[in-house]
Image (cartoon, helix red, strand yellow):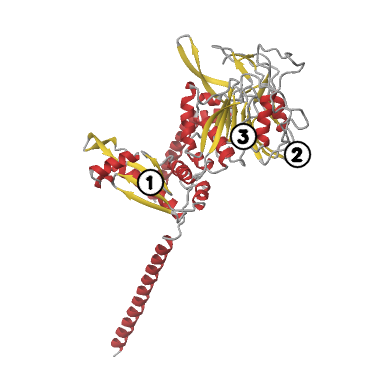
Amino acid sequence: MALRKEQAVLVNKRIKYGGNTLAFVAIIFGILVLINFLSTRRFIRADLTEDKRYTISTATKNVLNTLDDIVTITVYFSTNPAEVAQIRRDVRDVLDEYNAFSKRLQIDFVNPADFDDGQKQELRFKGIPEVQINVVKKDKAEIANVYMGISIGYSGKEEILPVVRSTANLEYELTSTILKVTTKVAKTVGFLTGHGEFDINNQNHQQFRQLLDKSAQGQYNLTSVSLQDGKVSVDDSVATLVIAGVKQPLTERDKYELDQFIMRGGRAIFLVDPIQLQPGTLQGAPLSTGLNDLLEHYGAKLGNNLLLDARFHDTARFQQGFMTVIQPYPYFIKIVKPNFSTEHSITNQLEALTLPWTSSLEMVTKDGITATPLAKTSEAGRSIQGYYNLMPNAPIPPNAESQVYTVAIALEGKFKSFYAGKEVPPVPTPAGADPTEGSEAPTAVPDTETRVTKTESEQTQIVVVGTAQFLTQLRPDGVNFFLNTVDWLTLGDALIGIRSHTITDRPLREVSEIEKNFIKYLCIVGVPLIVIIFGLLRYFLKRRAKRFVETYGSV
């Protein structure tokens, strides 16, 4: 009887614990189902990279939130070979994140391998080609024909990304293309010409023009702006005006037209070279542009000098006889991350920027104007003036004091006109004409007497940099800085944060000579010494243990 009772109790315990186990399993299963259900509507990701490189930027989220209709994204990607399939999966991961932040995206993946000849021909007309890639199969190199294109459509408009070989720059390309197809009216960015400036239509600058066109992505048009010696104004369609590398002094009438452009709410970028090099040499002389008084009135005073940085500088190529050598060059100032503005969207994600042959800038306090120093030299920056010998081995003037210099400034606010209370400057008399013919005064254009000077601007922005040479160098950091500036002035912050994800210059932290020598001798002497000490300790411990065994083992 007692045995039966014990068996019954044991069975009851098994049933009880078995029921608890089943209940526990059911609860865990229910929790997993609930998590899976919620994850389809909400998701959490942890991106541990410093600049959140694998998370779509706030700028992209803002663009997606402003969509007022369905944007169709069709991905024409082959599923084989494996190399292309991996890129296809990466593209899907990116688009899945896009889809998570907007309900106005329709994303479809299509495998063109299923298309007939007519559909493939239509795809080619659309702008998505069949491309050839090299693949390795069974230790044998082969050529495969694949599709790797994306189509973005909106309200009858369609733009194509013909070949997507990686996702490194995909977010920028996708978001800028979405902006392009959804933008109703494109703005215009103008480049001032007529004074020896950097001209985007010049054959020598076609590579830079291509970079600008690619960056614009339909968000803005590019054009040259000529004031024709003050005979015409800056067209009202121009939203941002670039004044880069002026070589001949601007007339008062030219400056007046620039001033009135800013007073109308136009944005402006002034890239002002401090020197002009003699052809074929590295001998420079001060360059007069006529912009000093105008820019100082707005809040940025040019230093009329040339800077070098004894600590942070880049390398340059020099011809020595029949050889080309690369060596450090202190006049190619390198701005590193601690010396960028961390608050301004133009520079807060830049890692480095090289500015060749630049001057200093000083912020002048103006009512209603906010001035932000975008970039500075290190504390080893030095200023020189006069006639410049810029050879790499030329001695530095001994009276040059070391300090931090500002080299780029952003100005925001409502600017006062430089010509408020002044007469409208007349158009200069052409060379060779008689300025006194029929009049004692220079000939004026018809609007001089009737022109009304606008004395205060709307809310607008101006950026001033102490050099324009980085445009001709085509260094990636300089291009990104310029494109960020154009985007900020023309489009706001819409694309800057996205482009900065692609910036990969991560310079090593500068260390002092003491630190260098410590690390050097630690590697040469310290590591072997540690090994020797470890070996001696091990030897003496083993010897001690052996004696201990011999002593107590004989007892």
Q: Amino acid at mark 3?
A: Asn
Sooner in the amino-acid sequence: mark 2 or mark 1: 1
Tell me where residue 181 appears, x and y as whole percent: 45, 44
Up/down of 84 relative to 5, above or below:
above
Q: Which residue is mark 3?
A: 339
State the SS at label 2: loop
Using the numbered discs, state the Cα–Cα distance from disc 1 to disc 3 in whole angstroms.
Answer: 36 Å
Using the numbered discs, state the Cα–Cα distance from disc 3 to disc 2 in whole angstroms.
Answer: 26 Å
Of residues 337 and 443, the one nearer the viewer is 443
The image quarter containing residue 541 is: top left
Residue that lies at the very extreme toward the bottom in this rendered image: 1
Q: Is residue 96 left or right of residue 512?
A: left
The quadrant of the image that shows the N terminus is: bottom left
Using the numbered discs, state the Cα–Cα distance from disc 2 to disc 1 in whole angstroms.
Answer: 50 Å
Q: Amino acid at mark 1?
A: Val
Q: Amino acid at mark 2?
A: Asp
From the image, state whether disc 2 or disc 1 is nearer to you.
2
Tell me where residue 376 appears, x and y as whole percent: 63, 31
Tell me where residue 101 appears, x and y as whole percent: 47, 54
Sooner in the amino-acid sequence: mark 1 or mark 3: 1
Mark 3 in CB contact with mark 2 (< 8 angstroms): no
Mark 1 in CB contact with mark 3 (< 8 angstroms): no
Q: Which residue is mark 2?
A: 367
State the SS at label 3: helix
Q: Residue at x 71, y 33 (%)?
A: 298
Sooner in the amino-acid sequence: mark 3 or mark 2: 3
Q: Which residue is mark 1?
A: 91
Tell me where residue 294 appears, x and y as whole percent: 70, 28
